[in-house]
């Protein structure tokens, strides 16, 4: 995230730290623990919660911008591919179900 570092805390907060270690902003993880590390996008941050919620946040102040409930715990964090977001909730062996 440019010159910032994103960290999550044991008390379910998301913090953006500057290169000098100062807290730029912080906010609660409103839907519980994350399913994986945050995904930094050009226009924000994407969080994937274990409850099956994907949330987009502002990189500037950490405020939630949009949420999507996919109703299943994702196996991996979403990734970007050719300007699209890909989220996988396949089986443990890596196969996908139709």
Image (cartoon, helix red, strand yellow):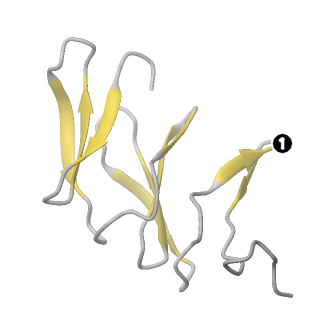
Q: To which quarter of the image does residue 95 belong?
A: bottom right
* Position of residue 49 in the picture relative to residue 85 (left or right): left
* Position of residue 45 in the picture relative to residue 24 (left or right): right
Q: Report the quarter where the C terminus lies.
A: bottom right
Residue at far front of view: 93
Q: Report the quarter where the N terminus lies.
A: top left
Residue 37 x/y as whole percent:
45, 49
Whether residue 90 is situated above or below residue 11 in the rendered picture: below
Q: To which quarter of the image does residue 33 belong?
A: bottom left
* Position of residue 96 in the picture relative to residue 73 (left or right): right
- Number of residues whose C-alpha sits closer than 10 Å to that of mark 1, classed few (under 14), some (14–19) or many (20 or more): few
Q: Residue at x 76, y 72 (%)?
A: 94
- Report the number of numbered marks: 1
* Between 13 and 62, the one nearer to me in the picture: 13
Q: Residue at x 42, y 73 (%)?
A: 50
Q: Residue at x 33, y 28 (%)?
A: 5
Q: Residue at x 67, y 50 (%)?
A: 79
Residue 45 x/y as whole percent:
46, 44
The residue indicated by pointer 1 is 82
Q: To which quarter of the image does residue 92 belong?
A: bottom right
* Between 63 and 32, the one nearer to me in the picture: 32
Residue 62 x/y as whole percent:
31, 43
Element under disc 1: loop
Residue 8 x/y as whole percent:
26, 48
Whether residue 27 is situated above or below residue 95 in the rendered picture: above
Whether residue 51 is situated above or below residue 83 in the rendered picture: below
């Amino acid at each position: 995230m440019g010159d910032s570092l994103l960290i999550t805390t044991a008390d379910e907060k998301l913090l953006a730290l500057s290169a000098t270690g100062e807290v730029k902003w912080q906010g609660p993880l409103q839907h519980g623990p994350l399913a994986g590390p945050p995904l930094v996008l050009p226009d924000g941050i994407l969080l994937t919660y274990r409850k099956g919620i994907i949330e987009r946040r502002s990189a500037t102040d950490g405020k939630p911008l949009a949420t999507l409930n996919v109703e299943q715990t994702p196996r991996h964090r979403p990734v970007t591919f050719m300007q699209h977001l890909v989220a996988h909730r396949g089986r443990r062996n890596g196969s996908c179900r139709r």
